[in-house]
């Protein structure tokens, strides 16, 4: 029998780094306080960590696929330096008005489903953290149980798609009980 691991799915812009429009180089990245600590907690509990990010800036021609991959490698390294392994980053390079409809652009669940299949993830025990309703919709469509929306906008704090709404990353720490499968906890 396959031992399926749960996964912490992370949106990138607005969750890992401050969302400036169309970030595509290391200088554009300011890490959001609390993100590394959060990842460490989930990693210690046996979760994989996968990033799922819409990158329509590629379809729009603002930056190239190579620029994106370069930034992704840099970012994986920044995590690794802090003791965190990112299993993979999935991205959607499309925009419906430019490249037509696709199955990967959130709110579609395509990226999450591909990762789930590839890494044999336990989707029922998995967690998605995003800063947009479309992140929550993608997670719900993929069958992800815990859907955390981080948004300073009071409007979004009531997203029906989310199972938890917070304004800041640090508010998540106090509420991890009931999310992290304690059976997975190692030493
Ligand atoms: Mg975002
Ligand atoms: Zn796509």
Image (tube, rainbow, N blue to C red):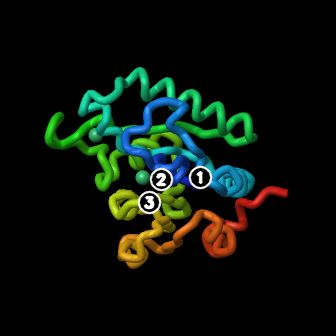
| Nearer to the camera, 148 or 171 | 171
Please tell me which of labels 3 and 2 falls first in the chain: 2
| Nearer to the camera, 31 or 41 | 31
Residue depicted at 53% across the width and 47% down the height: 17
Q: Which residue is mark 3?
A: 131
Residue depicted at 43% across the width and 46% down the height: 20
Q: Is residue 175 left or right of residue 110?
A: right
Circle 2 packing at 10 Å, graded few (<14), some (14-19), many (20+), is: some
Circle 3 packing at 10 Å, graded few (<14), some (14-19), many (20+), is: many
**In this view, 176 is above or below 65:** below
Residue 123, disc: none
Label 2: state its secondary structure.
loop
**In this view, 8 is above or below 96:** below
Residue 14, disc: 2
Label 1: state its secondary structure.
loop
Q: Is residue 115 left or right of residue 46?
A: left
| Nearer to the camera, 98 or 111 | 98
Residue 47 visible: yes
Please tell me which of labels 1 and 2 falls first in the chain: 2
How far apart marks 1 and 3 lie (CA) works out to 12 Å
Circles 1, 2 touching at the beta carbon (< 8 Å):
yes
The answer to whether mark 2 is within 8 Å of ligand 1 is yes
The answer to whether mark 1 is within 8 Å of ligand 1 is no
How far apart marks 1 and 2 lie (CA) works out to 8 Å
Q: Which residue is mark 1?
A: 32
**In this view, 161 is above or below 78:** below
């Amino acid at each position: 029998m396959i031992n399926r691991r749960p996964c912490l799915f992370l949106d990138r812009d607005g969750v890992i780094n401050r969302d400036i429009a169309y970030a595509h180089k290391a200088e554009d990245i300011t890490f959001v306080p609390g993100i590394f600590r959060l990842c460490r907690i989930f990693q210690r509990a046996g979760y994989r960590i996968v990033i799922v990010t819409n990158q329509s800036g590629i379809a729009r021609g603002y930056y190239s696929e190579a620029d994106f991959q370069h930034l992704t490698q840099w970012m994986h390294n920044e995590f690794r330096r802090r003791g965190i392994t990112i299993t993979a980053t999935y991205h959607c390079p499309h925009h419906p008005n430019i490249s037509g409809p696709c199955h990967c652009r959130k709110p579609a669940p395509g990226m999450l489903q591909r990762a789930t299949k590839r890494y044999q993830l336990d989707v029922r025990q998995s967690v998605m953290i995003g800063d947009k309703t479309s992140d929550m919709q993608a997670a719900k469509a993929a069958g992800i149980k815990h859907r955390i929306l981080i948004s300073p906008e009071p409007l979004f704090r009531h997203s029906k798609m989310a199972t938890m709404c917070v304004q800041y990353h640090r508010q998540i720490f106090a509420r991890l009980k009931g999310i992290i499968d304690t059976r997975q906890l190692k030493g």
